[in-house]
Image (cartoon, rainbow, N blue to C red):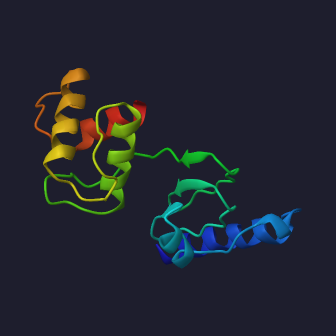
Amino acid sequence: MVIFGLAVLSVIVLINVIDDEPAQLGVNSAASSQDSGDTTTLPGASTTTVPGATGTTKPGSTATTKPGTTTTTSFNPAGRATLTIGSSGTDVLLVQQTLTKLGLYSGPLDSSYGPSTAAAVTTFQTQKGLSPADGQVGPATWNALAAA
């Protein structure tokens, strides 16, 4: 995991070094993104924010976001933990974002797996014909979310 994190950091540094418009870039920030509310940065990721831009970057990915746009990276469902009520973290946020895009979830993107997230997952599972439609995100549901 440490090697992976260092590789991501190296790519980010290289991108910043060869960027042809460094004067337009904001600050490299996990701290400032939390202060401004413009960007969600997941553990192990580093983000350079362009003023006025929003986005979500997962570890191992890079993105350039233009002002006024929102970018969410796709995910690989392999090896993800099963999510249930009470779960929290970046995987929950990813599920909430995906279900929001699909119009099934309208609650807060707060990384907390509560009853409204479970209800949206159950609706998704029912629509996709997954059984059981239990509101838990296990391997079959992860795969269906990745394909959605």
Say above or below: 115 vs 8.
above
How many circles with numbers are drawn on the protein?
A: 0
Q: Is residue 129 left or right of residue 48?
A: left
| Residue farthest toward the right in the current orientation of the protein | 20
Residue positioned 84% across, 69% down in the render: 23
Picture quadrant where residue 13 is located: bottom right
Q: Which residue is depicted at the point 52% across and 78% down? A: 31
- Find residue 109 and report its horizontal and vertical position in percent: 34, 53
Q: Quadrant of the C terminus?
A: top left
Camera-nearest residue between 79 and 104: 104
Residue 99 appears anywhere in the view: yes
Q: Position of residue 56 (x, y in %)?
A: 51, 55
Is residue 44 something one can see in this rendering? no
In the image, is 126 to the left or to the right of 142? Answer: left
Q: Is residue 105 above or below residue 63?
A: above
Residue at horizontal 57 percent and vertical 54 percent from the top: 54
- Quarter of the view holding residue 112: bottom left
* Along the line of sight, the residue nearer the viewer: 4 or 104: 104
In the picture, measured across the screen, residue 8 lies left or right of residue 147, that is right
Q: Position of residue 62 (x, y in %)?
A: 63, 57
Residue 134 at x, y percent in the picture: 10, 37
